[in-house]
Image (cartoon, helix red, strand yellow):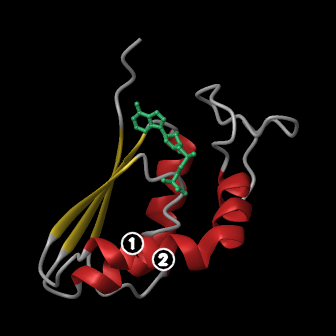
Amino acid sequence: MTTAHESVATHDSSTGQSLTTSAWLDTHFLAMQPEYETMLRWVGIQPGWHVLDAACGNGSFLPLLTELVGATGKVSTIDLAPENVQVVEQRAQQSSWLAPVVASKAAHYA
Ligand SMILES: C[S@@+](CC[C@H](N)C(=O)[O-])C[C@H]1O[C@@H](n2cnc3c(N)ncnc32)[C@H](O)[C@@H]1O
């Protein structure tokens, strides 16, 4: 998903941080998905846990995270870029993930 904020050259989100746009995060995650999902499974997250995905981006890890915590668990997410939080909210509404997902925008401390 591309938003009006995105810089094509450095993939800046509205926060000004490079490599943080939703489109870039999708491209990067897909390229690394097997390794990232192996790493996440290795953590040992158990059904029923309440997991925080801090700096979640557009929520690439949420399909597996919600699968791991299951219907008795919960995932909270936080990100600095409001457009990324919006994508997470849309994905949570449109997906049939087992666990509920609560998305929040982080406050910016300079
Ligand atoms: C490189 S991306 C990684 C996103 C995601 N974890 C992934 O692996 O696909 C870093 C994310 O951290 C967010 N971020 C940067 N500083 C943050 C802060 N202080 N609090 C919350 N999120 C932050 C950015 O907006 C961006 O979405």
**Residue 37 disc label:** 2
Q: Position of residue 60 (x, y in %)?
A: 53, 67
Q: Is residue 93 visible?
A: no
Three-letter amino acid code at the position of disc 2: Glu
Residues packed near mark 1 inside 10 Å, few (<14), some (14 to 19) or many (20 plus): some
Q: Residue at x 65, y 56 (%)?
A: 25
Residue that lies at the very extreme toward the right in this rendered image = 9
Residue that lies at the very extreme toward the top in this rendered image = 110
Q: Residue at x 47, y 61 (%)?
A: 88
Q: Residue at x 46, y 69 (%)?
A: 61
Quarter of the rendering occupied by the C terminus? top left
Q: Residue at x 20, y 71 (%)?
A: 74
Q: Find residue 105 and report its image quarter.
A: top left
Three-letter amino acid code at the position of disc 1: Leu
Q: Is residue 68 above or below residue 6?
A: below
**Residue 40 disc label:** 1
- Left or right of 57, for residue 42: left
CA separation in Å, label 1 and label 2: 5 Å
Q: Is residue 1 above or below residue 6?
A: below
Q: Are marks 1 and 2 in contact (CB under 8 Å)?
A: yes
Q: Position of residue 67 (x, y in %)?
A: 33, 86
Q: Secondary structure at mark 2?
A: helix
Q: Secondary structure at mark 1?
A: helix
